[in-house]
Each structure stands twice: as C-alpha cells, then as structure tokens.
Amino acid sequence: MQFMLLFSRQGKLRLQKWYVPLSDKEKKKITRELVQTVLARKPKMCSFLEWRDLKIVYKRYASLYFCCAIEDQDNELITLEIIHRYVELLDKYFGSVCELDIIFNFEKAYFILDEFLLGGEVQETSKKNVLKAIEQADLLQEKQQDPGPVRGKPLM
C-alpha cells in the first residue's frame, strides 16, 4: 500500500498515512486530486479505479471515505478487506465509531492503524491481538499520567 486517506463527504481530510516518501506539495496535490475524483463518482460505481500508475480502492462508511492506493499488481479485494478490518477495529475500540471520534481522537486512530499496518503491509490479522495491544498501551499511558494519591495537610 502506498497510502491511506480518510476524508468526509465534504472533502475534509480526517486522516492520512503515507508509506512512500513524497514532498508535502506532492501529497497535497495527490490528496486534492483523489478526493475530487472519488467524491465525483456515483454510489453504484465500482470501488476500484486506475489512477496514474496505481490502483485506488475506496469504501464509504457513513460520512467517511476510506481510500487506499496500491500497486498495479496488488489485489483490490484484499485491500477492501484491509479497509473493512480497520473500520471494525475503530468500531470495536470506540464503540460504534463516527467521524467525530476520529476528529477528536485522531492520535488513537493513527495508533490503531499503526498496530494493524506496518509500512503499508498487514502486521497483525487478529482483531483480538490488535485490540489487546491498544488496551495495554492505554493502561501504560494511564499509569504514566496518574500522579497517585495526593497528600494534603492533615485535617487535625
């Protein structure tokens, strides 16, 4: 996978993960072009399209589009399954995920993606294992943030 983009029906970018080195200018150009292309497609059209020398695989869930760019020889159906698995992970973690969950907890959405995909390749296929790793990281973060009991002046 070259990159993954999450954007709203209004074209607002909500999450982006790039697995190939590109300049910021090139990323913005690609993002703008792809968002316009995907949003212009009708709902009944195929979720795969050829774009430049890549294949674009996208799927809409509620108000968000999940869009991935893959190599020409890669399997589109596996990519569609990867998108679906990521949505399932988000859904399990947030409990019926919505666009606002991703907006206000984007660092967690990135963390879930990083636990699932590494360098554009599936790192862990088990939802259970990914969620367990996220849960452990949450516990560790809570321990680091908890200052422990606060001792004040004695009442007497």
Image (tube, grey):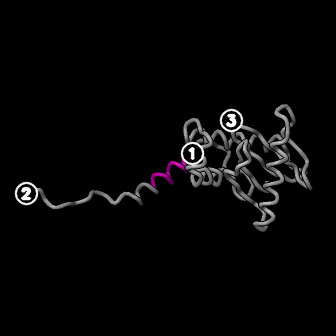
Disc 3 designates what residue? 62
The magenta stretch is: 130-140
As helix, strand or loop, the secondary structure at mark 1 comes to helix
Disc 2 designates what residue? 156
Q: Residues within 10 Å of mark 3 (few under 14, many from 20)?
A: few
* Cα separation between marks 3 and 1: 23 Å
Q: Residues within 10 Å of mark 2 (few under 14, many from 20)?
A: few
* Cα separation between marks 3 and 2: 59 Å
- Residue at x-position 57% and y-position 45%: 131
Residue 60 pos. (x, y %): 74, 38
Q: Residues within 10 Å of mark 1 (few under 14, many from 20)?
A: some
Callout 2 amino acid = Met
Residue 50 pos. (x, y %): 91, 48
The main secondary structure of the magenta stretch is: helix
Residue at the top extreme of this rendering: 44
- Closer to the camera: disc 2 or disc 1? 2
- Residue at x-position 78% and y-position 68%: 23
Callout 1 amino acid = Leu
- Residue at x-position 65% and y-position 51%: 113
In the image, residue 105 lies in the stretch drawn in magenta: no
- Closer to the camera: disc 3 or disc 2? 3
Disc 1 designates what residue? 131
Check whether the beta carbons of the residues at disc 3 and disc 2 lie within 8 A of each other: no
Give the mark nearest the N terminus, 2 or 1: 1
Residue 127 pos. (x, y %): 62, 42
